[in-house]
Image: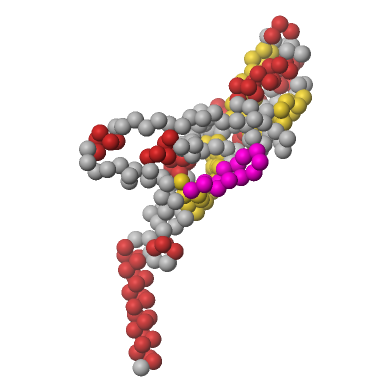
């Protein structure tokens, strides 16, 4: 990172920076993976409506990445505009504003009404982290990373890293909240980002990277391309001057 001083670089790079690991609370439009197993085979059949999706998850692996397409969109449960998911047999469960552990407890409380002796297992996980990479990315687009936690640097890496013209010190991050969306400016060159709430991206984040002024002026990606553009402009200017004088 560019704000690390040149003197004693090993000492500075080895300095511990506290990481912000605040807990994520579920919001509308989030997709969650819910697995329920009981001692009742009939109930298990009703709960196991996503068996085809489970095969896909096993093939994909724990830390996989998908571009645009999303296996959990079909096999998981999406919180509707009221923050509710509807489960087989159990019915509607409100999950908005809960972390995954509290969402699990909410399901277990409903299960106790239909399952004897508390013989059940419930697991609730985020169905991956979905985000959009816009602007000066090598591969801009929509991505889903099958992890519970993803740093902004991992998200950028999955999109092929930033282009050479990217303005890394003034990235726009648009984040969704229950009451709406907010836009923030993030400096990737500042190591303080690791202690900020933007170090880990959240589901449905949008990362927009603007080009530097050199790109806005239309110059080339490489020095040779830039030189060719400038040479062409100089030749054109000379031609115009010659023909008008």
Work out whether residue 245 can be spotted: yes
Whether residue 23 is in magenta: the answer is no
Residue at (48, 48) in percent of width and height? 185
Q: Which of the 4 quarters of the picture holds residue 157? A: top left
Of the 4 image quadrants, the one containing the N terminus is: top left
Q: Is residue 170 above or below residue 85?
A: below
Q: In this view, does 144 lie above or below 210?
A: above
Q: Is residue 13 toward the left or the right of residue 126 in the image?
A: left
Whether residue 184 is in magenta: the answer is yes
Q: In this view, does 30 lie above or below 37?
A: below
Q: Nearer the viewer, residue 169 or 141?
A: 169
Question: Which residues are the magenta region?
Answer: 173-185
Place of residue 134 in the rendered image (x, y in percent of width and height, measured from the top left):
52, 51
Q: Is residue 220 toward the left or the right of residue 71 in the image?
A: left
Place of residue 48 in the rendered image (x, y in percent of width and height, measured from the top left):
69, 22
Dominant secondary structure (helix, strand or loop) of the stretch shown in magenta: strand
Q: Which of the 4 quarters of the picture holds residue 9? A: top left
Residue at (72, 31) in percent of width and height? 84
């Amino acid at each position: 990172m560019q704000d690390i001083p040149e003197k004693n670089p090993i000492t500075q790079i080895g300095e511990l920076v506290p990481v912000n690991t605040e807990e994520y609370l579920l919001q509308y439009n989030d997709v969650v993976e819910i697995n329920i197993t009981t001692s009742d085979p009939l109930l298990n059949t009703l709960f196991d409506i996503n068996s085809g999706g489970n095969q896909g998850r096993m093939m994909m692996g724990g830390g996989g990445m998908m571009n645009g397409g999303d296996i959990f969109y079909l096999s998981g449960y999406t919180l509707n505009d009221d923050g509710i998911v509807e489960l087989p047999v159990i019915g509607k469960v409100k999950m908005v504003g809960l972390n995954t552990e509290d969402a699990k407890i909410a399901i277990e409380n409903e299960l106790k009404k239909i399952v004897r002796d508390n013989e059940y297992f419930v697991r609730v996980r985020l169905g991956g982290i979905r985000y959009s990479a816009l602007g000066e990315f090598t591969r801009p687009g929509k991505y889903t990373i099958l992890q519970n936690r993803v740093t902004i640097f991992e998200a950028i890496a999955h999109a092929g890293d930033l282009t050479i013209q990217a303005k890394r010190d003034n990235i726009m991050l648009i984040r969704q909240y229950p009451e709406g969306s907010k836009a923030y400016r993030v400096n990737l060159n500042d190591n303080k980002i690791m202690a900020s709430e933007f170090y880990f991206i959240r589901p449905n984040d949008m990362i927009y990277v603007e080009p530097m002024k050199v790109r806005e002026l239309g110059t080339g990606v490489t020095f040779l391309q830039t030189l060719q553009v400038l040479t062409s402009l100089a030749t054109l200017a000379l031609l115009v001057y010659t023909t008008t004088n």
